[in-house]
Image (cartoon, grey):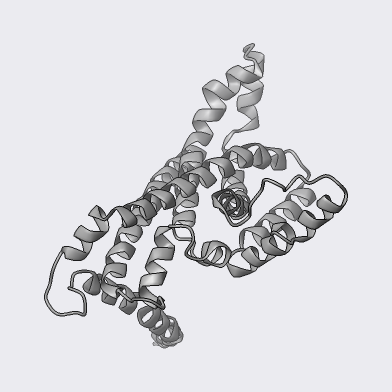
Amino acid sequence: MRWKTRNQMLYLFLLPFLFVTVAFMLLPLIAMVISSFTADGGGAWTLSQYATALTNKFYLVALKNSIFISFFSSIAGILIALFAAYSITRFSAKSREFILMLSNMTSNFAGVPLAFAYMILLGSNGLFTLLFKQWGWDVFASFDLYSWTGLAFVYFYFQLPLAILMLYPTYFGIHQQWRESATLLGASTFQFWRSIGIPVVLPGIAGTFSILFANAMGAYATAYALVGSNYNLLAIRIGTMVSGDIYVKPELAGALAVILAIIMVVAIWFNETMMRRVRRDLQ
């Protein structure tokens, strides 16, 4: 009886969390999906919103740009993180904790504060821009923070620490005994990584890429604060159709959001599949 009373109290404490989940996640999601299947202004059920989203060149370009910048920033982040994460595993335990803590803090520094920080440092009148120009070394003369290059650079900033945090544990799947056995059998370092190391970390790399891709696809605040509506991204298009000053099309925004959600869900499902393989290899 006492055990049942304690469980009931625990369920009671979960009620606020369940309320927040339903009110701020589940209900808006259901409303968005229903809205995506209705005509402009509500009313009749239709697939016209999805037809427009998948045939209109303007929205297709937004989807293409989002996929391209997400793919580019994910690949760039993984390439650097592969070597950075491996280097961290060779440090002392105290140094590893410090670097991982720093990476964790950096990966959460995104959105409007990140865009504002880049404007202060690398904008047209940014600190580094003016400082190097005063020194006669105008390295940022051809760099435009408010272009695709600047946007990709900012995306890469918050992708890299996240990639390090996710790739770091995968290297512990390579046991020291494997290295020693390969060395005793006469295998070189290249042969060890080609036949043993890379196959072990490959599922982790694939899973990390899918998470980074989904993370970049859903990024809105950083891109909007940096370039506004000047660059055609899917997340920005959805935002302007929900709260735009010129016109509002919540039904079409819902259809685009569902398409974006499907892409992200597929990416996360792929990550879970790859991580399951990593966990199986580590056992």
Give left or right: position of 71 versus 273.
right
53 relative to 202, above or below: below
Give left or right: position of 66 versus 86.
left
Q: Foreground residue, 27 or 128?
A: 128
182 relative to 71, above or below: above
Q: Residue at x 32, y 52 (%)?
A: 60
Residue 157: percent from left, percent from top: 63, 53
Give left or right: position of 67 versus 254.
right
Residue 35: percent from left, percent from top: 24, 74
Q: Residue at x 49, y 64 (%)?
A: 220
Q: How many marks?
A: 0
Q: Foreground residue, 40 or 74?
A: 40
Q: Residue at x 21, y 75 (%)?
A: 40
Residue 213 can be seen, yes or no: yes
Q: Foreground residue, 111 or 30?
A: 111
Quadrant where the image shows the N terminus: bottom left
Residue 183: percent from left, percent from top: 66, 17
Residue 118: percent from left, percent from top: 68, 60
Residue projecting furthest to the top = 186
Q: Residue at x 31, y 79 (%)?
A: 27
Q: Foreground residue, 211 or 15?
A: 211
Residue projecting furthest to the right = 135
Residue 283 can be seen, yes or no: no
27 relative to 260, above or below: below
